[in-house]
Image (cartoon, rainbow, N blue to C red):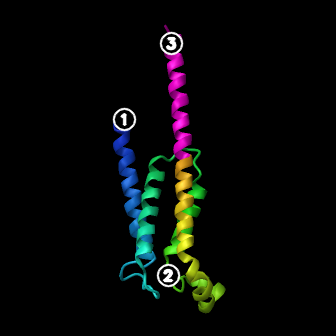
Amino acid sequence: MMAHTFPGIRRAAIAVGVGILSFGVLGTVAALWPNPLFIRMTPAGGWEIALLSLQSVLLGLYAAIWRPTCSIRTAGAGGLLNFLGIACPVCNKILLLLFGANALMTYYEPLRLYLAVLGVLLTAFVLAREWMLRSSERSKDVAALGGAVTEGR
């Protein structure tokens, strides 16, 4: 019953929690700051942290407006693209095995931040679409409720 009493507070708590969790986990795994778990082989610039921050805010907002028919795969793809864009290119063992260090540094490194931006844009698109769908559902519910109230008179 408490969840229905304060839905705004609950959604805000979900947004803040998911945002902080995604910032901490993705930033630590990408080794954007020194940590005992992962060591970054290439230096991180300011853009990586800014793009991670923006992605974390978008993921938090997306989690707060989650609907049962949401497009979670597209949001997940945006998060994955952002992570691949902010992560160290030679620290990713899968990419390193597939392409080799020379190919990664020659071809992938210059495009890495564009990949992170693409991930942010994809997540922003999904968030905007889900927001519009949720708003249209609410307006339909209000219209249906209003019709039921006027018919009952």
Q: How far is the residue under mark 2 from the one under mark 1?
A: 46 Å
Q: Position of residue 17 (x, y in %)?
A: 37, 57
Which residue has dot 1 on it?
1
**Residue type indicated by callout 1:** Met
Q: Which residues are magenta?
A: 130-153
Say whether marks 3 and 2 touch (CB < 8 Å). Answer: no
Quadrant of residue 112 within the rendered picture: bottom right
Q: Position of residue 55 (x, y in %)?
A: 46, 62
Which residue has dot 2 on it?
88
- Quarter of the image with the N terminus is top left
What residue is drawn where x is 52% and y is 31%? 139
**Residue type indicated by callout 2:** Cys
**Residue type indicated by callout 3:** Thr
Horizontally, residue 20 falls left or right of residue 74, namely left
- Marks 2 and 1, the one that precedes in the sequence: 1
Can residue 72 be seen in this snapshot? yes
Query: Secondary structure beneath disc 1?
Result: loop
Disc number lying in front (3 or 1): 3
Q: Position of residue 80 (x, y in %)?
A: 55, 67
Which residue has dot 3 on it?
150
Label 3 crowd bin: few (<14), some (14–19), many (20+), radius 10 Å: few
Check residue 11 for magenta coloring.
no
Quadrant of residue 110 within the rendered picture: bottom right
Query: Secondary structure beneath disc 3?
Result: helix
Image position of 115 with respect to 6: above or below: below
Find the residue positioned furthest to the right. 98
Can residue 80 be seen in this snapshot? no
